[in-house]
Amino acid sequence: MDAGTDDRRSPACSQHVVRQGAAMPKLDGVIETALYVDDLDRARAFYQDALDLRPMNSDSRFLAFDVGGRSVLLLFHRGATLETVHLPGGTIPPHDGHGPLHIAFAVTADALPEWERRLTEQGVSIEARTAWPRGGHSIYFRDPDNHLLELVTPGVWTIY
């Protein structure tokens, strides 16, 4: 057995052993965030009307929204991605999710009150507000599938 491995690891874990001295490649960001929804039409209406997101692509399994020109919010119809998807360029492995999940959208401090007004006008209830020690602020609300959404201003994390 190699000194850098542990034979008690599962086979999946053993393929991810980091060797001493190996240069680690850099991750550049998170491009896609996925939520799983029960009704794509209802979700499309909410994200378009309440958050003014515009679809980039869709089919019977999913909707893809542009978020700020830097990331993609994927809404998958719950249960519709349990089989491998075969495309001309390769495959997408199965995935799915259950229960309320959380994502946060970045907004400027000046825009947060405008967002709160817009959400209220759209009939979206603000569930909570937080003032963070670094000076940032968050508001929390739910989408129609009970996912917890957050609008967050700079001053929450050391990176934002």
Image: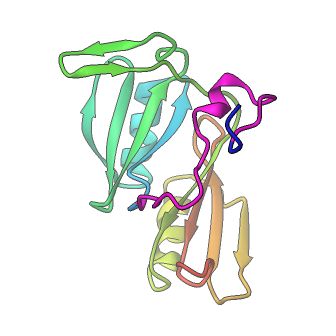
Q: Residue at x 65, y 42 (%)?
A: 101
Q: Residue 92's spot in the image, x, y percent?
A: 38, 22
Q: Main secondary structure of the magenta part?
A: loop
Magenta stretch: give its range. 5-27
Question: Does residue 49 sit above or below 134 in this rendering?
Answer: above
Q: Is residue 134 magenta?
A: no
Task: From the viewer's perspective, tell me whether residue 62 is left or right of residue 117.
Answer: left
Residue 86 horizontal/vertical position (percent): 30, 12
Q: Quadrant of residue 15?
A: top right
Q: Position of residue 43 (x, y in %)?
A: 46, 35
What is the residue that sits farthest to the right in this orientation?
8
The type of colouring in the image is rainbow
Quadrant location of the N terminus in the rendered image: top right
Q: Nearer the viewer, residue 119 or 78?
A: 78
| Residue 140 occupies quadrant | bottom right
Count every numbered label the image shows and give the total.
0
Residue 154 is left or right of residue 9, and the answer is left
- Magenta run includes residue 24: yes
As displayed, is residue 106 above or below residue 142? below
Q: Position of residue 58 (x, y in %)?
A: 28, 28
Q: Residue drawn 35% across and 32% down?
A: 63
Q: Nearer the viewer, residue 106 or 5?
A: 5
Q: Horizontal placement of 65 versus 137: left or right?
A: left
**Which sits in the foreground, 107 or 42?**
107
Q: Which residue lies at the image location 38% right of the left edge and 62% below the top edge? A: 28
